[in-house]
Amino acid sequence: MQKTLIESSVGYAPGGKDTGLVKPKGSSIIRAHEGLDTVPMRTRKPDWLKVRSPGGPEYLRLKGLMRSQALHTVCEEAGCPNIGECWEAGTATFMILGDVCTRACKYCAVAHGLPTELDLEEPMRVADTVRAMKLEHVVITSVNRDELTDGGASVYAETISRIHDAVPGCSVEVLIPDFKGDEDALRVVMEAKPEILGHNLETVERIHPDVRPGGRYWRSISFLGAAKRIDASLLTKTGLILGMGEETDEVHQAMTDLREAAVDILTLGQYLRPSMQHIPVARWVTPAEFAEWKRMGEGHFGFKHVEAGPLVRSSYHAKEQAREVEAGAPGRIQRVLEADIPAPAEVLPVLNLVQLEIGCPDRSDSGTIVGWDEGAPDGRN
């Protein structure tokens, strides 16, 4: 049975979640879509977005394996269109730390709310499953866990270490939250030595506050820059979703900003609306446009590798990237920015989202909620 925090709220609130109290994400109307003729939900998708429904023998085997180990995958939770292709090839992206997220991104199919469980046996089960699947490369991501003192960084580290121990030679890619800009948490993950460290920017600066109210644009970019400063041998990676209302020059600027943080790998894919309660698609981006973004990203902006296409998602062809791409040197941005500035969801009560407090929970007392001393109008103390 679905558990909800506020039954009267509007917005996306899926049922069937077993690790937290689900809360609706609120309105799907955003400022960036004012004046735009967005794509109606029932509009027929272009031919290039059509994929076969999953259901092959390997897909069914992996689904059974995930359920038997009580594991979640972002492939299922986020409704990835490539799930059939990837699972039939014996690859999957594990989603740790539960299936309820403290952030409420307007494009994401993962449930928002207040997590109530922390499964410390999960890293061992993930490693056992990776060994059973005989994987050569594995991707680990998670929900945001803003109520935890380290945002779940220690669970990431334990998962990475367990996989390396259980399957020597298996490369590990992590797609991490921003941990509210906590560099100590970032170090915890990096000290476990993943082969690729990813954190998705998701969209351009203008649209970012509307669709990602729990994060900040420059915090995400600089988090990747700080990772390069800590260990330049590590591949860094991010992703942008196109078709949410961004302009061409804004994508150019986002790519420029990411290269200032020396991000190595960029993925670009089409936004697909998960439900009527998510923001609409602003437009369909053509395969030719994605090919041009790849050409420009690698040739003009200097990314080591760009994976671009309508159905591309963060972990698409991840194994090949881990084997073939060489890490670059640190960039100009090497320190975490905006860690001390509240995200929109933290200062706009009208959003009515789960944000437990401003900043990170107090490490000296995990039961204490740290308040925010009001300072400058922009939230700086």
Image (tube, rainbow, N blue to C red):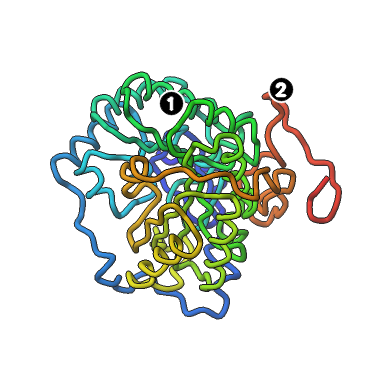
Question: Which sits in the foreground, 39 or 140?
Answer: 140
The numbered dot on residue 365 is 2
Q: Image height check: is 243 above or below 214?
A: below
Name the residue: 20% across, 42% down: 59
Residue 45 visible to the viewer: yes
Q: Which residue is mark 1?
A: 159
Q: Residue furthest right?
A: 375
| Residue type marked 1 | Thr
Spatial CA distance of label 2 from label 1 is 25 Å
Residue type, numbered disc 2 = Asp
Mark 1 residue crowding within 10 angstroms, few (<14) / some (14–19) / many (20+): many
> Sequence-wise, which precedes: disc 2 or disc 1?
1
State the image coordinates of residue 243 (x, y, percent, origin top left): 44, 68
Look at the image and tell me in which quarter the N terminus lies. top left
Q: Check residue 18 in the rendering and tell me which mark sits there, or answer none.
A: none
Relative image position of residue 42 (x, y in whole percent): 33, 71
Q: Could you say where residue 104 lies in the image, as x and y percent from the top left?
A: 54, 50
Residue at x-position 45% and y-position 62%? 297
Secondary element at image label 2? loop
Is 154 located above or below residue 248 in the figure?
A: above
